[in-house]
Image: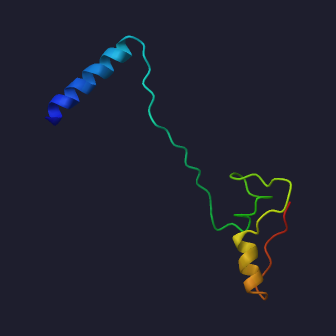
């Protein structure tokens, strides 16, 4: 059963591409970066992701950790 289905789908694909019909394939873009950076989650300084916007920006994870541990070193200032 699967062999027959595979042959039919392959024949359809070959016929469509032979006639110049493009077949769209699902695509996905994955952005990798060091997620341990002090600026990670700070929408004013991060390189990609959500824009900062005009109003209040949620605190980054580094800022939240700093608030819980006041004797820890402060994260770098926002640009």
Task: Examine the image and state in which quarter residue 38 appears.
Answer: bottom right
Picture layout, residue 43 above or below residue 65: above
Figure label count: 0
At horizontal 75% and vertical 63% (from top left) the residue drawn is 42
The spot of residue 76 in percent (x, y) is 81, 70
At horizontal 86% and vertical 60% (from top left) the residue drawn is 79
The spot of residue 46 in percent (x, y) is 74, 57
53 vs 17, nearest the viewer: 53
Task: Examine the image and state in which quarter residue 67 appears.
Answer: bottom right
Q: Which colour scheme is used?
A: rainbow
Task: Examine the image and state in which quarter residue 17 appears.
Answer: top left
| Residue at the outermost top position | 19
At horizontal 72% and vertical 73% (from top left) the residue drawn is 62
The spot of residue 9 in percent (x, y) is 26, 26
67 vs 73, nearest the viewer: 67
At horizontal 31% and vertical 15% (from top left) the residue drawn is 15
| Residue at the outermost front position | 55
Side of 45 where 17 appears, left or right: left
Picture layout, residue 14 above or below residue 72: above
| Residue at the outermost left position | 1
The spot of residue 61 in percent (x, y) is 70, 71
Question: Split into 4 quadrants, where in the image is the N terminus?
Answer: top left
33 vs 18, nearest the viewer: 18
């Amino acid at each position: 059963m699967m062999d027959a289905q595979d042959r039919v789908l392959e024949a359809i694909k070959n016929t469509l591409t032979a006639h110049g019909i493009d077949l769209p394939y699902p695509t996905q873009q994955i952005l990798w970066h060091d997620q341990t950076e002090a600026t990670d989650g700070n929408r004013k300084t991060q390189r990609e992701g959500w824009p900062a916007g005009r109003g209040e920006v949620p605190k980054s994870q580094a800022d939240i950790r700093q608030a819980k541990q006041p004797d820890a070193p402060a994260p770098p200032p926002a640009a």
